[in-house]
């Protein structure tokens, strides 16, 4: 079982760019034990032979570090559920996005943040969940979360990567994710970690991450977070996930 696994997924429209993301992870000052790339069987029928030649070469060159699996198509959940199945909830799993590159101090910063707040998932980007007279305020109205403040109401977003410490994902593998939050993995994982007794913390600068040139067609943020301040898919998913995990506003320390 690896001590630290960085897990990501991709799909055909982005697969030619994902090698740039993987190279940025390989160049980290602190490298993970494994880089775990989960791909859908129904999108890559030929397995590894369907991958770009440059990515195939990268995988061969770093075969001791890169593991590729072809799995059922759980959409964005592929970046976490196959890794959980492979390594178990006792591992440290860091999710990464497939459309950005990461600076060389990225993973070291997440690990340092986790060491400082061992009972919390940590990430570099996040907001603070707020309540109003009607319950939870709309997702798009939440302000940026304070730095280095582990709290149940901190909501991390995945673009900058999220580190999930051992034990925090013990409830995340429930098959109900597909019915409760089919396109909102960040929401599902937030509630799963909260139900396991883990807060969340934003660490580092919250910097913007450089694009690797991947297509933004089909990006979930365009569906989940609308440009207006109205009701979003994330708002519906948050309410559904809180109910599924039997969580209340008091569990978020909100009233």
Image (cartoon, rainbow, N blue to C red):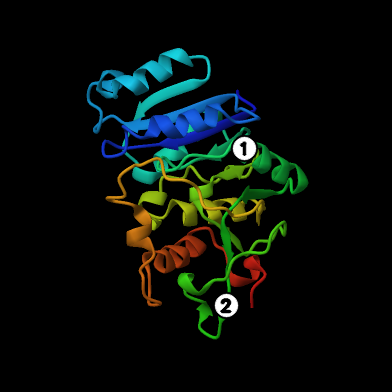
The label number, if any, that marks residue 107 in the structure image: 1
Quarter occupied by residue 214: top left
Q: Are discs 1 and 2 less than 8 Å apart at CB?
A: no
Viewer can see residue 134: yes
| Residue positioned 66% across, 51% down in the render | 204
Q: Could you classify mark 1 by the number of other residues whose Cα lies within 10 Å: few (under 14), some (14-19), or many (20 or more)?
A: many
- Percent position (x, y) of residue 39? 35, 31
- For the residues marked 1 and 2, what is the alpha-carbon distance in whole angstroms? 32 Å
What residue does disc 2 label? 131
| Residue positioned 35% across, 18% down in the render | 56
Pick the residue in front: 249 or 92. 92
- Percent position (x, y) of residue 145? 63, 64
Q: Nearer the viewer, mark 1 or mark 2?
A: 1
Viewer can see residue 82: no
* The furthest residue to the bottom: 133
SS for tag 1? Answer: helix
């Amino acid at each position: 079982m690896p001590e630290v696994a960085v897990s990501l997924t991709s799909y055909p429209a982005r697969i030619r760019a994902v090698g740039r993301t993987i190279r940025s992870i390989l160049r980290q000052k602190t490298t993970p034990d494994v880089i775990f790339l989960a791909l859908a069987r129904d999108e890559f029928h030929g397995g590894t032979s369907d991958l770009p030649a440059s990515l195939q070469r990268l995988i061969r060159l770093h075969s001791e570090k890169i593991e590729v699996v072809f799995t059922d198509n759980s959409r964005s959940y592929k970046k976490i559920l196959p890794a959980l199945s492979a390594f178990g909830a006792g591992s440290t799993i860091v999710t990464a996005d497939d459309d950005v590159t990461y600076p060389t101090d990225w993973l070291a910063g997440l690990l340092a943040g986790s060491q400082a707040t061992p009972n919390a998932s940590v990430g570099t980007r996040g907001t603070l969940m707020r309540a109003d007279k009607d319950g939870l305020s709309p997702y798009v109205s939440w302000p940026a979360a304070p730095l280095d403040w582990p709290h149940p109401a901190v909501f991390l977003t995945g673009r900058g990567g999220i580190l999930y410490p051992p034990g925090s994902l013990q409830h995340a593998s429930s098959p109900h994710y597909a019915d409760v939050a089919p396109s909102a993995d960040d929401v599902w994982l937030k509630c799963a970690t909260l139900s396991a007794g883990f807060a969340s913390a934003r660490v580092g600068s919250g910097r913007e991450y450089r694009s690797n040139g991947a297509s933004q067609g089909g990006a979930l943020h365009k569906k989940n977070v609308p440009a207006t301040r109205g009701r979003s898919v994330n708002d519906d998913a948050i309410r559904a996930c809180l109910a599924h995990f039997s969580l209340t506003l008091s569990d978020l320390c909100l009233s």
